[in-house]
């Protein structure tokens, strides 16, 4: 793989130590999750405090799941995010409305298991500013993301017109070189892959992940 830079988003941050670790490693984006069922859930006030050292250094992403206007109003006013990530069943109309209401770019997440799951993307083209592709949650999980499972990355090769999407789902230091080689993605998102347990970021795993990404993008491709 060529030595192009890959944007790295670390999602589900809850502590100042984790924020400092990802900033030290040069993260492109940091993500805060506002979804009470998630072990990574934070309140807007807490996220605003955690995001303070990242302002101007990394993009601040607010991740919500089918959030109403009142919840989004509070998050936007307190956190002042750079991007809104919608990880629920938001319609194209809802995405357009949210963009217009807050004047912020919107990243729409899609859950992928099989080829047909990409059919849902088309109506959002030209509306969402960016797409994020995560693995479909295992049966029984109430979380739309952060489940530590991957989808078949070969499916992405067959798609066109996805723009500069973000790859998510089951990424870690061990498989990131394969993920990047198979997809050619310029942006990746990780949460559970740098955790010692759900919701608890591990500083050593964070360092190891960034090291693995840099190694992957700087290793000459062999025939």
Image (spheres, helix red, strand yellow):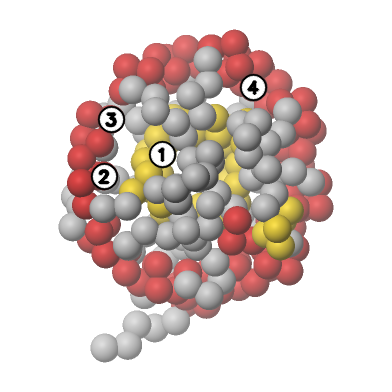
Per the image, label 1 sits on a secondary structure element best described as strand
> Residue under circle 3?
124
Q: Nearer the viewer, residue 61 or 143?
A: 143
Per the image, label 3 sits on a secondary structure element best described as helix
Disc 2 from disc 3: Cα separation: 13 Å
> Residue under circle 1?
109
Q: Residue at x 23, y 29 (%)?
A: 123
> Residue under circle 4?
75
Which circle's residue, 1 or 3, is located before the other in the chain?
Answer: 1
Disc 4 from disc 1: Cα separation: 18 Å
Q: Nearer the viewer, residue 105 or 86?
A: 86
Per the image, label 4 sits on a secondary structure element best described as helix
In the image as oriented, which residue stretches furthest toward the bottom? 223
Q: Are marks 4 and 1 in contact (CB under 8 Å)?
A: no
Quarter residue 179 falls in: bottom left
Residues packed near mark 3 inside 10 Å, few (<14), some (14 to 19) or many (20 plus):
some
> Residue under circle 2?
117
Instruction: Please name which of the two marks, 2 or 3, marks the residue nearer to the observer.
Output: 2
Which circle's residue, 1 or 2, is located before the other in the chain?
Answer: 1
Which circle's residue, 4 or 2, is located before the other in the chain?
Answer: 4
Disc 1 from disc 2: Cα separation: 12 Å
Residues packed near mark 1 inside 10 Å, few (<14), some (14 to 19) or many (20 plus):
many
Residues packed near mark 4 inside 10 Å, few (<14), some (14 to 19) or many (20 plus):
many
State the quadrant of the N terminus: bottom left
Q: Is residue 132 above or below residue 182?
A: above
Q: Is residue 122 left or right of residue 17?
A: left
Which circle's residue, 4 or 3, is located before the other in the chain?
Answer: 4
């Amino acid at each position: 793989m060529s030595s192009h830079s890959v944007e790295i988003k670390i999602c589900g941050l809850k502590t100042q130590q984790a924020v400092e670790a990802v900033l030290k490693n040069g993260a492109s984006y940091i993500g805060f999750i506002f979804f009470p069922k998630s072990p990574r859930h934070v309140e807007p006030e807490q996220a605003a405090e955690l995001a303070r050292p990242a302002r101007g250094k990394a993009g601040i992403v607010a991740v919500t799941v089918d959030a109403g206007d009142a919840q989004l109003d509070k998050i936007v006013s307190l956190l002042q995010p750079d991007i809104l990530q919608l990880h629920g069943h938001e319609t194209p109309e809802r995405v357009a409305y949210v963009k217009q209401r807050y004047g912020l770019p919107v990243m729409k997440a899609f859950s992928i298991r099989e080829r047909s799951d990409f059919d849902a993307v088309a109506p959002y083209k030209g509306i969402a500013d960016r797409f994020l592709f995560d693995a479909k949650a295992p049966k029984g999980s109430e979380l739309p993301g952060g489940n530590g499972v991957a989808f078949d990355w070969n499916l992405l090769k067959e798609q066109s017109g996805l723009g500069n999407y973000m790859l998510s789902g089951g990424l870690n230091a061990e498989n990131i070189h394969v993920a990047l080689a198979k997809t050619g993605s310029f942006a990746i998102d990780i949460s559970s892959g740098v955790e010692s347990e759900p919701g608890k970021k591990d500083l050593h795993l964070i360092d190891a992940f960034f090291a693995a990404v840099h190694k992957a993008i700087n290793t000459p491709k062999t025939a």
